[in-house]
Amino acid sequence: MSDMIPLLTWLFRRGKCKYCGAPVSSRYFWVELLNGSIWAGIWWQYLIAEANPAKAICFALAASTLVAIIFIDWELYIIPDQINAFLLFVGLAFNGWLYYVKSPAATINGWPSSVVGALVGVGVLWGIAFLGRLLFRKDAMGHGDIKMARGIGAVLFPITAVMSFGLAVALGAVLGVAQVLLRKGEGAAQESEPEGDSAYVPESIGSLLKCGVGYILCIDVIGLFIPKLYRAWFEEDPFEPIEDLEDFEAGHTMIPFGPYLALGAIVAAVFETQLLRAFHSYWQWAAGK
């Protein structure tokens, strides 16, 4: 049993296996610490300050999913479709429960709140990708980020989701700059060949439009169960292993946005009550009420 105590086992063993002495990555410690802290915040907010166990379960599942995304995307610059699909399912299931208990929060103008949130998530992130491609002729947003925003919208619903995107931008602006500076310092210590842009070819606008429609229709999610549909629409296999991940090296200014999207969503989930209260107060002030 002493090997099964979160956080403490890793500390007591000094980051090494009890039996063979092999080092155990500190990632396990940080994942457990972050996830446990978030769950504690959700427990206090939705089970102590409020009595909303369904939302607590939904946000806890979503938060753990987002923690996984943070560490995966930070290291590998990918967000697996299966994780994004699970995030979407969590939001839809929560909305289904709201329908079951006849909660007014289940719908927005007659539409399921999770569906509206998912559409808003796709619209905002895909819109950024489209404008970036159109104006700067560069890929401004990863497709995994767009699909994750869809799941975030489904879980948080549109207003809170949009606030989480704003938080993500703020976090990215501060922490992203720090990350770039750290990488630049590391790069100065290790000489590397200059990176050229001659081989870089941005995604075509037609492909971006087609993918955007696919994300709205959730073809990427359905395609996990019907791979032929996925291959026909996106022209790639959802289960094909991604090659050369171990050899991949990010440039100094190549910063994944997924971790910041996830952090923004986690903050918005834990402090949703306070954020919505501030939003409504500002809205009334702006309207002169």
Image: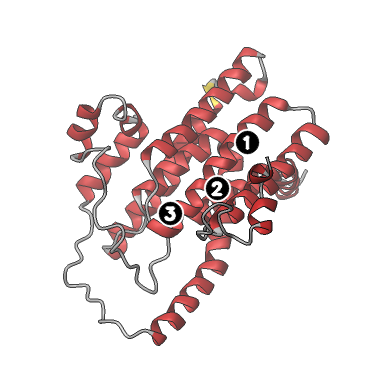
Judging depth in this view, the residue of 238 and 176 nearest the camera is 238
From mark 2 to mark 3, how far is it between C-alphas?
10 Å
How crowded pointer 1 is (Cα within 10 Å; few <14, some 14-19, many 20+) is rated as many
Pick whichever of labels 2 and 3 is earlier in the sequence: 2
Q: Amino acid at mark 1?
A: Phe
Q: Position of residue 52 (x, y in %)?
A: 74, 27
Q: Amino acid at mark 3?
A: Asp
Disc 1 element: helix
What residue does disc 3 label? 73
Q: Position of residue 79 (x, y in %)?
A: 40, 47
What residue does disc 1 label? 59
Disc 2 element: helix
Say whether marks 2 and 3 touch (CB < 8 Å): no
Question: Relative to residue 254, is residue 40 drawn left or right?
Answer: right
Q: Position of residue 229 (x, y in %)?
A: 22, 28
In which quadrant of the rendered view does residue 12 lie?
bottom right
**Residue 108 shows in this picture:** no
What residue does disc 2 label? 67
